[in-house]
Amino acid sequence: MHKKILAICAALVAFAAMSAAPALASSNLTLQKNGATVATGTFIQATNEGNIVFETGVGPVTCTGSTLTGQVTTNSGTEIAGDVEKATYTGSAPEGKCTSTWLGDIKPDPEALPWCIKAGGKLATDTFEIRGGKCSEATKSLQFTLTGASNCTYTRANVTGSYNTGGTQAILTIGASQTFTKTAASPFICPTTGTLAGKYKLETDEATPTALTISSTL
């Protein structure tokens, strides 16, 4: 009987170990171009898919074009990261400005660049983050100024969202309710808060961009 009990216990331990194995496996998270791993130092860009909208209580600011450009700094298999060195926002108004119903034609001015964009590591599965400062630096806040009839500056610690994996082009979707808070206004009053929403497709920063994909396997 004693031997039977030991055998049953051993079987239970073995079964538990087999069941736990997948949960202990590391996720293989890799940024790819045509199935090959993208090297660090490669210049890539995130280009808007649809409008980028900053919604306030008195109406939206709408930009029809936006590009984030930078270099890949990490593509380790468990983490993808890059430094955004340039961010542009354009619209359908004269001089390529974005439009709004409360501030007239607007020129968004991103501040405190570079920004860090990151996925994997300690972040939740299929979640990305954009925050101020290089990825190798201490975290800084995101900040931008809407320049129009009044200059309205807004700040937030970071922006998070989701991305798709597999063989299709990687799309970054900024999550709902990403609220920025007004930190400065001149010379007129500006809305106290605003929420940012939009999507970006990842591609190479070339004359003819190539779609980038994100591979994620266990």
Image (tube, rainbow, N blue to C red):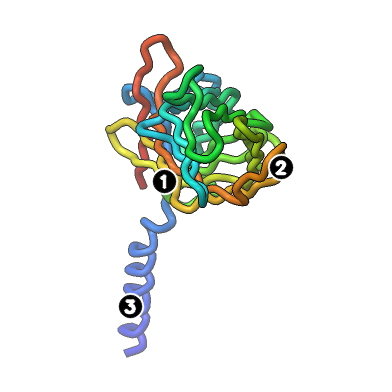
Left/right of residue 139 with respect to residue 95 in the rendered view: right
Which comes sooner in the sequence, label 3 or label 2? 3
Which residue corresponds to mark 1?
162
| Residue in the foreground of this view, choosing between 81 and 104 | 104
Q: Residues within 10 Å of mark 1 (few under 14, many from 20)?
A: some
- At horizontal 71% and vertical 37% (from top left) the residue drawn is 187
Which comes sooner in the sequence, label 1 or label 3? 3
| Residue in the foreground of this view, choosing between 34 and 210 | 210
Type of amino acid at the residue the image marks with label 3? Ala
Residue lying furthest top in this view? Answer: 207
Q: Nearer the viewer, mark 1 or mark 3?
A: 1
Which residue corresponds to mark 3?
7
Q: Nearer the viewer, mark 3 or mark 2?
A: 2
Q: CA distance from mark 3 to mark 2?
A: 71 Å
Residue 214: x, y in percent? 38, 35
Q: Quadrant of residue 208?
A: top left
Instruction: Tell whether label 2 touches label 1 (CB within 8 Å).
Output: no
Q: Can you say whether 42 is above or below 19 in the image?
A: above
Residue 125 visible in the current orientation: yes
Which residue corresponds to mark 2?
184
